[in-house]
Amino acid sequence: MDAHQHFWHPARGDYGWLPPEDPVLSRPYLPADLAPALAATGVERTVLVQAAPTTAETEYLLGLADATDHVAGVVGWIDFERPEEIDTLRRLAAHPKFLGLRPMIQDISDVGWMLRPELDWAFRAICDLDLTFDALGFPRHIEYFSALLARYPGMRVVLDHCLKPMITDESPESFDEWARGIARLASGTGAYCKLSGLVTEAKDDWRREDLAYYSDHVIEVFGVDRVMWGSDWPVCRLRCEYETWYETALSLVSHLSDADQARIFGGTASEFYRIG
């Protein structure tokens, strides 16, 4: 299972982060575009994750999910700053393929945004409706996510993209800061972690070895039962095609048993997102 992929159509107009002339990203990506990669790798199911901060996009993704067999579920978006959106969230939660929420925290200037008291209703609703929370951020958000998880210990949380370590501009200090923070989250909370996004954070001429330090640390501190692989397609295409990242990720966990590899490439995501 691929625990993290996207579809989008720039003409919809709500993907503010997309570079307007990017030759890789600024084009539509739909199920037919992903199908050859899934066939080549044998990946049978995916989790479709929001890429725009609108409920309209979430509705769009749910429509795609309804029409696409391999999409096992959708992680969507609502406006956490509007308590009246509780009715929208309840409606979305009734959809059989709606899994949870992902606010785009990495794009919010207030690094401690998630701890604002006025957002409490949204996090409580996630818990009450038994939804998931995808934590999208950077190493600078680690202490704030730690505080958030302590505040809502029953919330099912997964850290997207290993919280985007600074692989391109790596230094001993940046690696140690990320590694210590990730270890604190792993030992002090029940969060899961997505083994995704690493290749995108690497240099254009990346090597497998550039990623191994990070994947090894994540697997060591979280354990295979709390790590899930995701492609982050089509964003991964900034560095390589789907098949290349898939094969690289397989090589990064090749020292593990077949059972442990199966957890990372399917079992963990199925358990976390409760996909039957």
Image: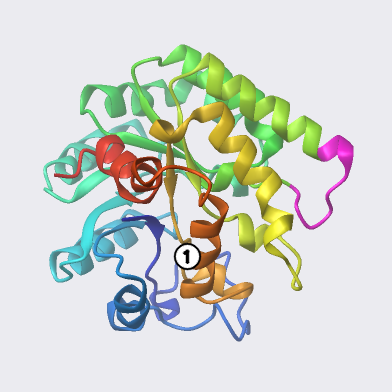
Residue 15 visible, this orientation? no
Task: Determine whether the residue tagged by mark 1 lies in a helix, strand or loop.
Answer: helix
- Residue 49 lies, in percent from the top left, at 37, 55
Along the horizontal axis of the image, is 105 left or right of 93? right
The residue indicated by pointer 1 is: 246
Q: How is the image coloured?
A: rainbow
- Magenta stretch mostly in which secondary structure? loop
Tell me the kind of residue under disc 1: Tyr
Q: Which residue is found at the position 27% from the left and 40% from the top? A: 273
Q: Position of residue 98 (x, y in %)?
A: 21, 47
Q: Is 7 situated above or below 148?
A: below
- Front position in the image: 60 or 83: 60
Q: Which residues are magenta?
A: 166-174
Left or right: 216, with 70 as reference point: right
Report the front residue among 255 and 229.
Answer: 255
Which of 212 and 14 lies nearest the eye of the viewer? 212
Quadrant showing the N terminus: bottom left
Left/right of residue 51 with respect to residue 271 in the rendered view: right
